[in-house]
């Protein structure tokens, strides 16, 4: 799931950068106009606003949410995430394996509920770094910082009862929209469309402070192998 998000966001980022290059090439050797300078300043201000909003996610140390992925209106997957302190449990409806992560220890366990067997996976530094930046929202917010530099502020909108600041990018072939919770800093929704295809990722059932230790701990009868 995380890889899919990264690819979509990087696509938006590359499109936005290409758009800037095209605009610069069309001006040839002429100096930048005031309109161009104003637009650059506006984009920089928008990016700073988005980053400051997402920084609030660092305080999310106890939360539950479901991350939905859709393609052209059809649901592809549902990822359920529990976070308490430095520990996380992740379930995806496309897999029988449950992921238990202890970010403080750098331990990643893939656990099969049916066989009650688990195996420790190598520590993933990218996940650890994301968690340090976004705490409980690390999965929902993963790598959006690489895309928001090309988005313009586009007002506010309510998503799942959360007031969100909205970022927008649009050209002749593509459109991207991001919705960031003002209160929690979590990316509540991200839409990307190009041609006849539209991808949507959104958070639902966000619950703050509802996760217990038992929710994120491996079952006591789990048989875990590995280092």
Image (cartoon, rainbow, N blue to C red):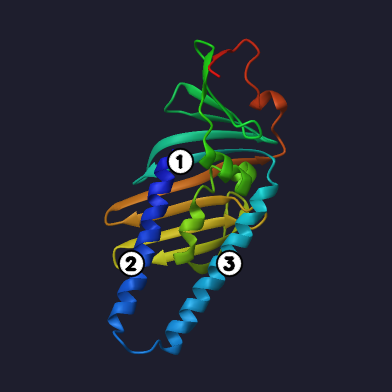
Residue corresponding to mark 3: 48
Residue 101, picture quadrant: top right
Q: How far apart are labels 1 and 3 at the CA level?
A: 24 Å
Q: How far apart are labels 1 and 2 at the CA level?
A: 24 Å
Query: Which quarter of the figure is the C terminus placed in?
Result: top right
Question: Residue at point 36% right, 60% down?
Answer: 14
- Cβ–Cβ below 8 Å for labels 2 and 3? no
Residue corresponding to mark 1: 2
Describe the element under mark 1 as helix, strand or loop: helix
Foreground: 30 or 157?
30
Q: Position of residue 168 (x, y in %)?
A: 46, 64
* Circle 3 Cα neighbour tier, 10 Å, few/some/many (<14 / 14–19 / ≥20): some
The circle on residue 18 is 2
Q: Position of residue 190 (x, y in %)?
A: 47, 52
Please tell me which of labels 2 and 3 falls first in the chain.
2
Query: Which quarter of the figure is the N terminus placed in?
Result: top left
Decide: is 28 above or below 99. Answer: below
Question: Residue at point 50% right, 51% down?
Answer: 189
Q: Position of residue 105 (x, y in %)?
A: 64, 30
- Cβ–Cβ below 8 Å for labels 1 and 3? no
Q: How far apart are labels 2 and 3 at the CA level?
A: 21 Å
94 relative position to 212: left or right: left
Residue 102, picture quadrant: top right
Please tell me which of labels 1 and 2 falls first in the chain.
1
Describe the element under mark 2 as helix, strand or loop: helix
Q: Position of residue 146 (x, y in %)?
A: 47, 57
Decide: is 180 above or below 219. Answer: below
- Cβ–Cβ below 8 Å for labels 1 and 2? no
Question: Residue at point 40% right, 38% down?
Answer: 75
Foreground: 199 or 147?
147
Describe the element under mark 3 as helix, strand or loop: helix
Decide: is 151 above or below 187. Answer: below
């Amino acid at each position: 799931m995380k890889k899919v998000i990264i690819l979509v966001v990087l696509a938006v980022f590359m499109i936005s950068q290409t758009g800037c290059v095209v605009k610069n090439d069309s001006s040839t050797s002429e100096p930048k106009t005031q309109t161009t300078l104003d637009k650059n300043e506006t984009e920089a201000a928008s990016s700073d606003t988005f980053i400051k909003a997402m920084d609030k996610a660092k305080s999310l140390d106890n939360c539950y949410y479901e991350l939905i992925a859709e393609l052209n209106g059809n649901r592809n997957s549902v990822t359920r995430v529990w976070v308490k302190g430095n520990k996380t449990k992740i379930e995806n409806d496309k897999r029988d394996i449950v992921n238990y992560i202890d970010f403080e220890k750098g331990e990643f366990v893939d656990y099969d509920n049916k066989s009650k067997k688990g195996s420790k996976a190598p520590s993933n530094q990218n996940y650890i770094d994301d968690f340090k930046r976004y705490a409980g929202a690390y999965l929902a917010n993963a790598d959006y910082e690489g895309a928001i530099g090309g988005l313009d502020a586009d007002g506010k909108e309510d998503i799942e009862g959360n007031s969100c600041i909205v970022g927008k990018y649009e050209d002749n072939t593509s459109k991207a929209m991001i919705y960031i919770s003002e209160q929690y800093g979590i990316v509540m929704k991200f839409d990307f469309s190009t041609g006849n295809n539209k991808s949507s990722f959104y958070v639902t059932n966000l619950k703050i402070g509802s996760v217990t230790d038992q929710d994120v701990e491996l079952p006591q009868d789990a048989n875990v192998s590995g280092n």
